[in-house]
Amino acid sequence: MATNDWDDDDDFDFEDQGQNNQGSNDGDLVKKLRKALRAKEKENKDLAERFESVSKVQREQIVNQVLNQKGVNPKAARLILKTWIALMKRRSMACLKTTLTFSG
């Protein structure tokens, strides 16, 4: 039967650590964790915005390419693309409102 190395590891035994000045260490730890969380949330938001921007451009290019391949008049294609973008914005706003309603 194999032994588990992680059972013998005392690195995660938090009960014995910081008994002398636990209040100070806990406060510093909480501050560091909150700071790290804010940094990760900001990074996540930035990445989501960049992804949405790239996705939007890609979708527009695909729709425009399909309309051109189908022989749609370029002026009509721009109008169709503009309408399609407006509908997608409305749809995303409706989804956002639904999400906020259910989460709040």
Image (spheres, rainbow, N blue to C red):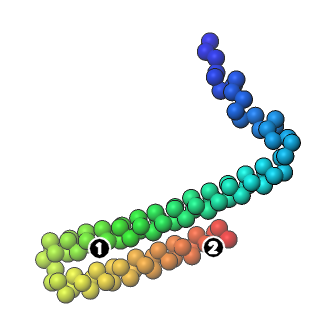
Contact (Cβ within 8 Å) of mark 2 with mark 1 = no
Quadrant (top left, top right, bottom left, bottom right) of the C terminus: bottom right
Relative image position of residue 57 (x, y in whole percent): 32, 71
Mark linked to residue 60: 1
Quadrant (top left, top right, bottom left, bottom right) of the N terminus: top right
Q: Nearer the viewer, mark 2 or mark 1?
A: 1
Of 88 and 23, nearer the camera is 23
Q: Residue shown at 86%/42% (left/top)? A: 20
Q: Amino acid at mark 1?
A: Glu
Of 77 and 25, nearer the camera is 25
Q: Which element is circle 1 on? A: helix
Classify 15 as above or below 93: above
Q: Is residue 17 left or right of residue 1?
A: right
Q: Residues within 10 Å of mark 2 (few under 14, many from 20)?
A: few
- Which residue position is annotated with label 2? 101
Q: Residue shown at 83%/46% (left/top)? A: 22
Q: CA distance from mark 2 to mark 1?
A: 30 Å
Q: Amino acid at mark 2?
A: Thr
Q: Earlier in the sequence, mark 2 or mark 1?
A: 1
Classify 14 as above or below 66: above
Q: Which element is circle 2 on? A: helix
Which quarter of the figure has residue 33? Answer: bottom right
Relative image position of residue 56 (x, y in whole percent): 35, 71
Relative image position of residue 52 (x, y in whole percent): 41, 68
Classify 69 as above or below 30: below
Of 92 and 43, nearer the camera is 43
Of 57 and 17, nearer the camera is 17
Q: Is residue 36 left or right of residue 10?
A: left
Q: Residue shown at 56%/58% (left/top)? A: 40
